[in-house]
Amino acid sequence: MKKISSGKVREIYEVDDDKLMLVVSDRISAFDVILPTPVQDKGKVLNRISEFWFEYVKDIIPNHIITTKFEEFPEEFKKEEFRDRSMLVKKLKMLPIECIVRGYLTGSGWKSYQETGSVCGIKLPEGLRESEKLPEPIFTPTTKAKEGHDENISFEEVSKLIGKELAEKVRAKTIEIYQKCADYAKTKGIIIADTKFEFGLDENGELVLGDEVLTPDSSRFWPADEYEVGRSQKSFDKQYMRDWLKQNKWDAQNPTPIPEDVINTTRNKYIEAFERITGKKF
C-alpha cells in the first residue's frame, strides 16, 4: 500500500482510486513537535472516540467511514498492529480550511479577547472572563499550514477560498455538530470548550465530514464538576502534557524522553475521556 501522508499522529495509505486507510499512531505532539515518547493505546482511543462521534452526528451530515471492522479491512491491514486504530474511508476532496468552533473563551481566543475585545474578528460582549461560556458558539476558521501554525482567517476569506454558499453551509454544519455533541457531553460530565472539524466533497460534490471528530487531540475537554469561570481549567486532553513541558522548560531542540509517570497520567486522561463519552470500558 502506498503511504501518501504521515502526519504528527496519523498515517494515510491509498487503497485504490477512491479509498484510503487511516491509521492512528500512539505519537503525541505538543507545540508543533512530535514528542520522543509515545503514549500507549492513544491511537486506539482517538480512533474509537472518532468512530463514536461520526455515528452520533450522521443525521446532521454524512461521513467518510466505509468500515472500522478489522475483518473487512484490505488484506494488507489484517495485522494486529492495525486493529482498533484504523478505518477504511472514502477519498474526499478536502476543503483547504480547518473549521474551528469555540463555545468558551479560552486559549488563543482568550488572549485575543483581552487585547482586542474580539476573537478572529468577531466582536464579543465586554466584561467576559477566562473560560466563560460564550453567548453562542462562534466559527473561527484557519488555514491548513503544511509547516508551523495554522493562520486565522475571516469568514469572508473562507468565502473567497471555497465560495459563499459552501462557506455558509460549512459554518452552519460546524456549529450544529458542535452544539449537538457539546449537549451530549455535558450529560457525561464533560464540557467541550472548543474543537475543530474537517470537511471534504465526495464524488457528487456533497459535503462530508472527514478526518477525526471531537477527540482529545482536536478539542478541549473539561471536567464539568471542576469548572470555574475566571481561570484556566483542568482537562482530559493533552493540555496536561503541554503544561508539564512548559513547567519543566522542555527543549524541543534537544528533546529528552518524557518521564513514565507523565506518560501514564496522559494515557489515563485519554482513556477516561473515551469511557465517559462512549459509556464503554476501554
Image: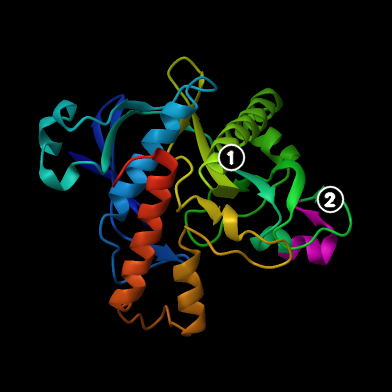
Q: In this rendering, is residue 193 above or below 75?
A: below
Q: Is residue 82 left or right of residue 68?
A: left
Tell me where residue 139 appears, x and y as whole percent.
Answer: 69, 41
Q: Label 1 is placed on what type of residue?
A: Ala
Q: Residue furthest top?
A: 204
Judging by the rendered image, the residue that carries numbered circle 1 is 182
Asked if residue 116 is among those painted magenta in the image, a careful observer would answer yes
Dot 2: within a 10 Å radius of its alpha carbon, few (fewer than 14), some, or many (20 or more) residues? some
Q: Label 2 is placed on what type of residue?
A: Leu
Q: Which mark identifies residue 124?
A: 2
Quadrant of residue 91 in the image? top left
Q: Work out how far the residue at label 2 is from the one at label 1, CA to CA, in angstroms.
A: 21 Å
Asked if residue 264 is among those painted magenta in the image, a careful observer would answer no
Tell me where residue 17 appears, x and y as whole percent.
Answer: 28, 25
Helix, strand, or loop for circle 2?
loop
Helix, strand, or loop for circle 1?
helix
Q: Choose the circle earlier in sequence order: 2 or 1.
A: 2
Q: Locate the N terminus and report the quarter of the image it occupies.
A: top left
Q: Which residue is pictured at 45% across the width and 47% down the height? A: 215
Q: How many marks?
A: 2
Look at the image and give the residue range highlighted in magenta.
111-120
Which one is closest to the eye, mark 2 or mark 1? Answer: 1
Tell which of 83 and 143 is nearer to you: 83
Tell me where residue 279 appears, x and y as whole percent.
Answer: 38, 39
